[in-house]
Image (tube, helix red, strand yellow):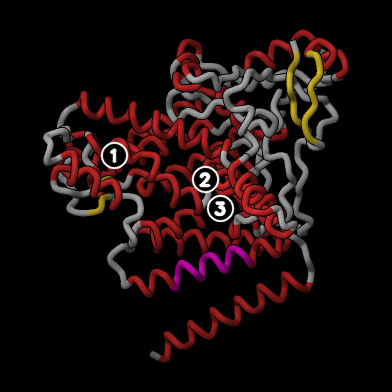
Amino acid sequence: MCVETRNEGGTASTPQSDLRAKTNEGFNTVSPPAWASGAIILMVIGSFYATFYITPLAFVEGEKSKMGGYAGAVEVMEAGGKTLYILAAIPFFLLMILMEMVISVVSNLQCVGGRYSFDDAWSSLAAGITQQMCSSLVKVPLKLGILPYSYIHYTFSVPNGLNLPVDSVGVWVGCALVVDLCYYWLHRKSHEWLFLWAGHGVHHSSEYFNLSTALRQSWLQVLAAPFFYLPMALFFPPALYFGLDQANIVYQFWVHTCLVRRLGPLEWVLMTPSHHRVHHDRRLHKNFGGFLIIWDRMFGSFVDESEGVRGLERLGDSSAPQEEVLLFGILPKVGTWTEAVTQTQLYAPVVKAVKSGAGLTGILKACYVGPGFTTAGAPRSLVPPSASAQRIRKVSPLPPAARSYVLAQFVMVVLVGFAVLISATAPYALRLFTGATVLYSLYCQGVLLDGEGRKGLHWEGARALLLSLLLLLLLLL
């Protein structure tokens, strides 16, 4: 049997037995204490319950309900409103990230990728803020996420009596299943097609795997994703699709952790941290489900983490440190911390094709063929990496004092950004200007983290001067 495995240099096909013989593992599988895994699971369950209960009460587009949970959501949807589960979950996301940081330290989590570094956590959160600004200030005002869907639903579904009621538990279950199926194909094609991977790859660019990685999102994908859900419009009302699509995304937050290992029989059905760790291996491109793993089992894109663990256990040394059998991140090294805001690096093959005069066929191929084009549906084996594999390839050279400054600025940006998200009734021009200021501030912080000396100081100085002048102008007015 041959196994294709990718490394930083490209792709190599080697007989599986020979490859394992050549790798000097030098580490054991990760085994956090049971209390740490239990703490994460209890925290997730409590946070998710609170999110789904309070959303109809406070986080809706339209008239709020006086009831929480399912009953309140139905009332909001029947009145034509939308439940904003993601917005309601953001404070819980940040709280869980802080708690995971503490738990990983107290439990002495040994794997490098499962821990936290300031610069990587900053880049993940910065990418998430960039995505939310794009969604709130571009996607929502232009109704890109709901207008095409609503047109199909009210033009073809309602006149023909195909529309389903929102007050049925069975309809909710059916809609949740179809949402996840559509997400599976969106996710899979986002690895197979480069013009989608160029956006989605931002989520994979972290070489760590923790809860902050879940927030590392793409502004491009948030614009392209709605088109994969349009077939649902023939049956499911827009408000129900919108709400359960958001609920699906909220679920995916918790599977980004190394503190939870295997979950017994649930591994057969649900997308779990174990399955999603495989998905984030830079060599594989597998396991694309949202909250269910059954689609991957059905469509030939499933790889089990336990396969790599078994290989490691056969060769491991009981006295060696613990480490993941996976290499997180993407094959090309991220060049700059500002990539969290600009998100343009993965378009390089298209730019190269254009500059080289590859012609229309070459350019289209560069846009179409992504890193998972041939691997997503092909048989793959998870082979433990060599102990010498470079797991973390980018670290900010910024000294601690300067990082403290970036952290203080970042906290302010988070607060201002959240204010933009919840102030939907404020003048659009004010929200747009504030959102642009948030993104500019994040970009300046990225330049500082790159440690480029005078360049970073110039960018940050210009930002501070601009904000000071604007504040003075506001006071004079």
Prevailing secondary structure of the magenta residues: helix
| Front-most of residues 339 and 456 | 339
- SS for dot 2: helix
User: Distance of mark 2 from mark 1, alpha carbons?
Assistant: 22 Å
Q: Residue at x 49, y 20 (%)?
A: 299
Check whether the beta carbons of the residues at disc 2 and disc 3 lie within 8 A of each other: yes
Q: Residue at x 39, y 69 (%)?
A: 431
> Which residue was labeled with disc 3?
127
| Front-most of residues 319 and 258 | 258
Q: Which residue type carries mark 1? A: Tyr
In the figure, is residue 255 to the left or right of 313?
A: left
> Which residue was labeled with disc 2?
215
Q: Nearer the viewer, mark 2 or mark 1?
A: 1
> Which residue was labeled with disc 1?
241
Question: Residue 438: x, y in percent?
Answer: 51, 66
- SS for dot 1: helix
Q: Which residues are magenta?
A: 433-443
Question: Residue 255: x, y in percent?
Answer: 51, 30
Sequence-wise, the earlier of marks 1 and 3 is: 3
Question: Residue 201: x, y in percent?
Answer: 60, 44
Query: Does 439 appear in magenta?
Result: yes
Task: For the C terminus, give its image quadrant.
Answer: bottom left
Task: For the N terminus, give its image quadrant.
Answer: top right
